[in-house]
Image: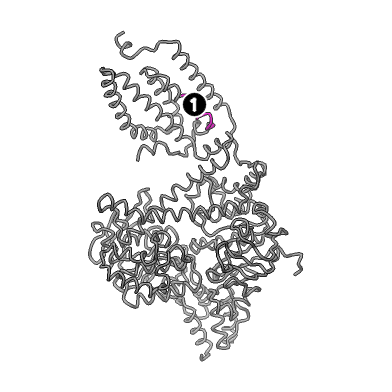
Amino acid sequence: MIEVKDLYFTYPNDVEALKGVSLTVSDGEFVAIMGQNGAGKTTLVKHFNGLLKPSKGEVLVDGVGTKRASVAQLARKVGFVFQNPDHQLFCETVEEEISFALRNFGFKETTIKRRVTWALNLLGLTQYRQTSPFMLSGGERKRVALASVLAWNPEVVILDEPTIGQDYQQKETLRQFIVQLNAQGKTVVVVTHDVEFVAECSPRVVLMLQGKILAEGKAEEVLTNLSLVAQASLVPPQITQTFLELADLGLPTNVIKVHDASRILLNLLEVTP
Amino acid sequence: MSVFEGFKFRRVSSPVHDLDPRVKFLYVCVVFAAAVMFSELLPLILLLLIQVPFILLAGVQRAWLKSMRGASLLALLIFVMNLVSMYLYQGQILLEYSLGMTLRFLVLVESFSTFFLTTSPDQLSLALEQSHVPYEFSFAFTTAVRFVPVLAEEAQTIMDAQRARGLELERGNFIKRVKNYIPILIPLIVNAIRRSLELAEAMESRAWGATEKRTNLYVLKMRGGDYTLALISLSMLTIAIYTRLYLPVPSIATLLHL
Amino acid sequence: MGEALAIIEAKGLAYAYPGRTNHSIKDLSITIERGEFVILTGPSGCGKTTLCRCFNGLIPHFYGGKLEGDLTVAGLNVSEHSISELASRVGLVFQNPENQLFALSVEKDVAFGLENLGMPREEIRERVDWAIKMTGVEDLRDRAPHELSGGQQQRVAIACVLAMQPDVMVLDEPTSFLDPLGAQTIFEVINGLNKKLEITVILVEHRLDLASKYADHVIIMDRGKIILDGEPRKIFDSEEARLIGVGIPRVTRLYQFLKEQDVYLRKVPVASEEASQLLREVLVRDRG
């Protein structure tokens, strides 16, 4: 469980990025932290694995304050997949790359081999075991980065803007993967501004604006509140916009998924599928 | 590092900032030449003081003081080393001479610091261009300056990404610590190469190399203030040379006994 | 639709990067008319980025190798003219805003291309001021690129290309790193340039939900070939688009679900405004 208690954070260049944020992420939750670029989303999640320490207030991971804990200690529980895989790839083979964190955390060599095989399999990278990560395509490198974090089986997985530069199929695959991870009991935190992606997953949504939490709640509640969405400089899902414009005809105002929208309309038109 | 703060350009408006960088550079060279010509205290103190009006006029006192503070450690080192070496070499304690060497160093730091504080990298590259340095060099210079903050940020992000994988940069003996920087350096270098490729594509796409006769949006024109400074600099140089050749320079000791 | 209006004409275009055995684009033929707003899309690796680089001559001149087939852009045969010659006819805006800006102020960056062309100072000044005004970055004129947000940087990049007054502007996934509002602003700027200045726009995008409403011509590629080429609504509604796995706008998907149950909207929607209008017609008709 991650508890954020009245967190303030100021960068060395005197920019106050977080101004009193309080939040709890329970075990097994699926949370999307949303907002425009510069709202403080990444700054917030970097406190979860101790990369950043609070200027004021505190952050507790499973009851342990992050101020005293080292990043290595916290990272064991909280895995962080960075936005750009090229910021971490440096090994000669994909196998080495995935083993890197495992070695840092002190896993035995036999366990490492097993975990690497498992992670490669999970992300469909088995054929690239001995390939240099630099030879892979952008999408494949993203999967290597993800595999290298899942390999050490952290309880919490944070993904920072995982949908950037991805085409539709890649996003779909990723979405299904994340939902599965969550179903297996992992706490998943996704930092994103991709509203359509979030709409299809329906996680708990935390909206941030200028270093503060603007609103939080179920995706169906937050993403359908036009005024909140506009304040956070996001664009509501297309389906939501469509339905809100038809509210005067009695259409529900909390629809974000295409399938739900279709079902509701067919019901209204008394068409039996 | 505070000493570097004293060399970073501040975007402030002042008459000194508006001066032609080439003339400012001439002034700095003259101060350098004069400082080297004398090892006596009196002229060096004079050189130190003569620059103060410029610093005040440019409004960069605080930053300049930071550079002087940063240089003070080195200055102390120079003083002590000169004292010791002169004692060993000539068997005397040459206080004035050592002080003089220290002051010379400070005069140089003072003038270069003022120069860089009041001249933007853009102006520098423009000065280079107009002095017929091939464009590739001034372009390489401005591009490097432009990307320094970007690379610094990227280095920080890479360190964060690797620390998030359990890499502990502060632990271990010397060799281990050096090895720990490989996961930082490799992504940094690879990304720098990738970035250069993208930059090259963008440059080509905007007609880089279309013609030998490249023009410029800005142009450096010498104006009243520039000519004045040029005149002052040349006068200073003349006086310095004349003094060195023909006039006796009294030491402080002599002056005090008067 | 005569040939005289075609600003880009490609016939049997094929290209393999030096050192690679497989072709990134194969036997590609398209016609793009002057003033069109084209969306070019397809799964990752389909060859759209390669095609963009052909338009302004980076392929073959920068990347090397041989460009097979014929490609004429704004009257110039790409293989026979240098990149700098093509630069005043075709502009290319790249995905990463940071790596397109080299100068220490916005103004100087916008002037970069014109300085390269050796234009006289007064003309550079005019064009720079004009381009800055057209892209709405007047208040950023003296700022350094590093101080700007991603969206601002991309607008500046567009100004840099616009200053050269090209006939065609190609933008390769320009909103990848931007948030939705930043992306919308970019699309509005591009649309403005297309409608007001008649600059032909070729936009490579995955975010079809935000961009589709501006397009009058859509091209979908897959594995180096052109699979679909024509009117946006017809293409988004097609079976092939679904099979290729292109992320069609959500409201178009809704249209398809309804169609499967024999509920027909009058038109294929690509944006929420039209979708709600079309649904309103059906719902009101149903009640009345």
Q: Residue at x 53, y 37 (%)?
A: B123
Q: Residue at x 49, y 38 (%)?
A: B120
Q: Where is residue A148 shown, x and y percent of the image?
A: 36, 67
The image quarter containing residue C191 is: bottom right
Closer to us: C133 or A225: C133
The image quarter containing residue C174 is: bottom right
The image quarter containing residue A110 is: bottom left
Query: Numbered disc 1: what chain?
Result: B
Left or right: C196 in relation to B160 = right
Q: Secondary structure at mark 1?
A: helix
User: Residue type at mark 1?
Assistant: Tyr
Label 1 neighbour load within 10 Å: few <14, some 14-19, many 20+: many
Q: Residue furthest bottom?
A: A272
Q: Residue at x 31, y 72 (%)?
A: A115
What secondary structure predominates along the stretch shown in magenta? helix
Residue B48 in magenta? no
Residue B28 in magenta? yes
Placement of B97 over or under A116, stated as above or below:
above
The residue that label 1 is drawn on is: B27
Q: Where is residue A248 shown, x and y percent of the image?
A: 52, 78
| Residue A41 seen in this snapshot | no
- In the rendered view of the protein, which quadrant contains the N terminus of chain A? bottom left
Left or right: C151 in relation to A215 = right
Q: Where is residue B191 shown, x and y percent of the image?
A: 45, 55
Q: Residue at x 39, y 12 (%)?
A: B249
Chain part drawn in magenta: B20-30
